[in-house]
Amino acid sequence: MEKQFLVDDLTIGEAWRLFKIIGEFVEGVEALHEIGPAVSFFGSARVKPTDSVYKKTEKLARLFVENDFAVITGGGGGVMEAANKGAAEAGGTSVGLNIILPREQKPNPFANIKIGFKYFFIRKVMFVKYATAYIILPGGFGTLDELFEAVTLIQTQRIQPFPLILVGSEYWAGLVDWIKEKLLAEKRISTQDIEILQIMDDPEEIVKAVRKVIII
C-alpha cells in the first residue's frame, strides 16, 4: 500500500522525494499550460447524479464551455464528476486533477485531461494557477479548504484577484452571515475582504459575472 502521510515522511534521509515533487509540478504545468481560460469547480464528492446540485453543476459546466472556458475539477465523483461530464458532453476541455488517496477518491470517466497527484499542495497550485474563477458548490471540508485558501491568497495579494462564486444562497448564506457577524464585526477582517465572496444561484448569471471580468 502507498504511504499515506507523505509530507510527514519528508526527512533529510529522503531528500530524493523532492525530485518526485518537482516531477509532479512539471507534469501539471506541461499538461495545462495551453488549456486557455478555465474555471475551477469545487464541491462535494458525495453528491449523486439525481441530486439537484449535480444537475446544476452539469449545466454550469456546459455553459462555461459554450462561453469558451475550460473546466477544471478534482477529478473525482459528485460535483467533480458532474462538472467534467457537462464540459465533456459540450465538447470542451474537461480537466480532472485527481488526488491519490488510500480510500474514497476514484477518477471519474468524463475528464479528457487527467493528471494524478500524490501531494495535495501541488494539486492546489494547479487549481489556482490555471483558474480565471473559482466556482464553489455545496461541499464539505475539502471544499471549504479550497475556498478559504483562495480567499487568503487574494486577501494577501499573493495572486491576482478573480471571481470566487459560492453557488447556492440557501447553502452558503449562513456561512457568509457568520463571517460578517463574527470576523468583520470583531475586526478580524476588513470590509473589502467580504467583497471577495459572491453568492449566486442562476447559472447564466454566474457565467455572465465571470465573463464580465475575464476577457477572452
Image (spheres, grey):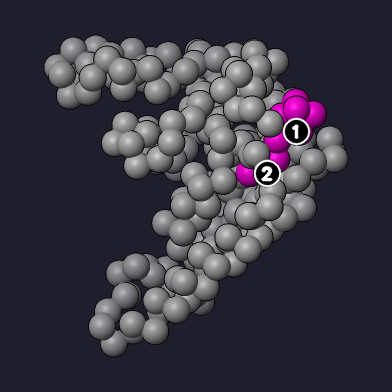
The label on residue 68 is: 1
Q: Residue at x 59, y 14 (%)?
A: 201
Real-space CA distance between mark 2 and mark 1, rounded to the nearest whole angstrom: 9 Å
Instruction: Specify whether 193 is left or right of 159.
Output: left
Viewer-proximal residue among 178 and 165: 165
Which label's residue is closer to the chain start, 2 or 1?
A: 2
The kind of secondary structure element at disc 2 is loop
Q: Which residues are magenta?
A: 62-72
Number of callouts in the render?
2
Q: What is the quadrant of residue 204 in the picture? A: top right
Q: Residue at x 39, y 84 (%)?
A: 16
Instruction: Specify whether 93 is left or right of 139.
Output: right
> Which amino acid type is marked by label 2?
Gly
Q: Please, is residue 36 above or below residue 22 in the view? A: above
The kind of secondary structure element at disc 1 is loop
Residue 169 percent coordinates (x, y): 51, 13
Q: What is the quadrant of residue 49 in the picture? A: top right
Residue 44 appears in the picture as rendered: no
Residue occupied by mark 2: 36
Question: Marks 2 and 1: CB-CB under 8 Å?
Answer: yes
Residue 89 percent coordinates (x, y): 84, 38
**Magenta stretch holds residue 204:** no
Q: Please, is residue 215 above or below residue 106 in the view? A: above
Viewer-proximal residue among 177 and 124: 124
Q: Residue at x 61, y 44 (%)?
A: 73
The label on residue 28 is: none
Instruction: Specify whether 17 is left or right of 116.
Output: left
Q: What is the quadrant of residue 13 in the picture? A: bottom left
Looking at this view, name the residue that lies furthest to the left: 186
Q: Residue at x 33, y 84 (%)?
A: 14
> Which amino acid type is marked by label 1?
Asp
